[in-house]
Image (spheres, grey):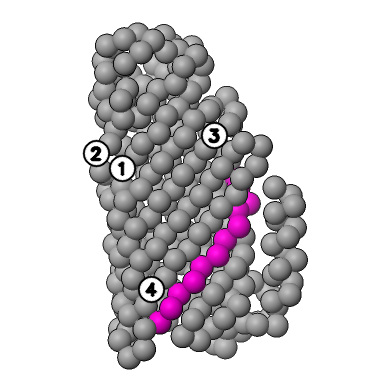
Amino acid sequence: MKKIVLSTIAILSLSTTIHADTIGAEVGYAAWNAELSGNLQKGLGNLDFKQDLGYGDKTTNSSIWAYIDHPLPIIPNFKIQKTNYSDDSSGTITKNVTFDNQNFTLNDSVKSSIDLNQIDLIPYWRILDNWVNFDIGLNFKVIDGDISINSSTANADFSVVLPMLYTKARFDLPLTGLSVEADISYVSYDGNKFSDIKAGIVYETEIGLGATAGYKQQKITLDDIDDLYGELNIKGIYAGLFYHF
């Protein structure tokens, strides 16, 4: 992972003479209607989120963000984003499994809840700034996760800070106020993988008020993070409002 970070810094150092022409900022809010799939292990055997715990229905959560662009060379622009994902469900265990030193057997009924709180701290450089905007930087993603089964009879929590590669592209459609955009954050190390991908359309009025909608997917592969193993896949559509000034 150190090699990835150093390579990114080297690329960014080559781009410091290319920057935005004016100062700009944006604040926004979006609702994310997503579903959870995958599995989790903390002991002998794993629990499938859909088959064992009953997840799979979509739930709506929120995301808020703010960023500032400036014309100063070398100094990065900065974006901060907070995303919450929480859900709860009831299910029936399909196999014998031990989770957090608690034994569950075939046909046991369980209730569970999951909370994933994320903060993204993103210093980035704008490589292109015209009808095509292209950003590259780092995303220091802070994740606090908690999964409880049967009112904390069995509990798994983890906290991690990830330096991820970050890139974003936006293409303005002339004379329409519309644009399309996509951004990606990704890192892989020691068997752990984290990706955060979003793509959608944007409409902005002449006064800076705008709307956005699209599709967002997060994939988290845990390989002995706070004694946890497994895969979490959260995906669904989003829609939100913003003000650009």
Measured in 3D between alpha carbons, the distance from the residue under mark 1 to the one under mark 3, in whole angstroms, is: 19 Å
Looking at the rendered structure, the secondary structure element under dot 3 is strand
The first of marks 1 and 4 along the sequence is 1
Residue 222: image x %, image y %?
Answer: 54, 34
Looking at the rendered structure, the secondary structure element under dot 4 is strand
For disc 2, the marked residue is 57
Residue lying furthest bottom:
175
User: Is residue 3 positioned above or below 231 on the image?
Assistant: below
Q: Can see residue 164?
A: yes
> Quick one: 138 or 180, which is closer to the camera?
180
The span picked out in magenta is 161-172
Q: Amino acid at mark 3?
A: Leu
In the image, what residue occupies the spot 52% across and 37% down? 221
In this figure, what is the number of numbered marks?
A: 4
Q: Residues within 10 Å of mark 1 (few under 14, many from 20)?
A: some
Measured in 3D between alpha carbons, the distance from the residue under mark 2 to the one under mark 1, in whole angstroms, is: 6 Å
Measured in 3D between alpha carbons, the distance from the residue under mark 3 to the one under mark 2, in whole angstroms, is: 23 Å
Q: Nearer the viewer, mark 4 or mark 2?
A: 4
Main SS of the magenta part reads strand
In the image: residue 43, left or right of residue 36: right
The question of residue 175 being in magenta is answered with no
For disc 3, the marked residue is 222
Labels 1 & 4 near each other (Cβ < 8 A): no
Measured in 3D between alpha carbons, the distance from the residue under mark 1 to the one under mark 4, in whole angstroms, is: 24 Å
Residue 203: image x %, image y %?
Answer: 31, 77
For disc 1, the marked residue is 35
In the image: residue 165, left or right of residue 220: right
Q: Residues within 10 Å of mark 2 (few under 14, many from 20)?
A: some
- Please identify the quarter of the rendering in which residue 207 is found: bottom left
User: Is residue 20 positioned above or below 76 on the image?
Assistant: below
User: Is residue 175 positioned above or below 125 on the image?
Assistant: below
For disc 4, the marked residue is 180
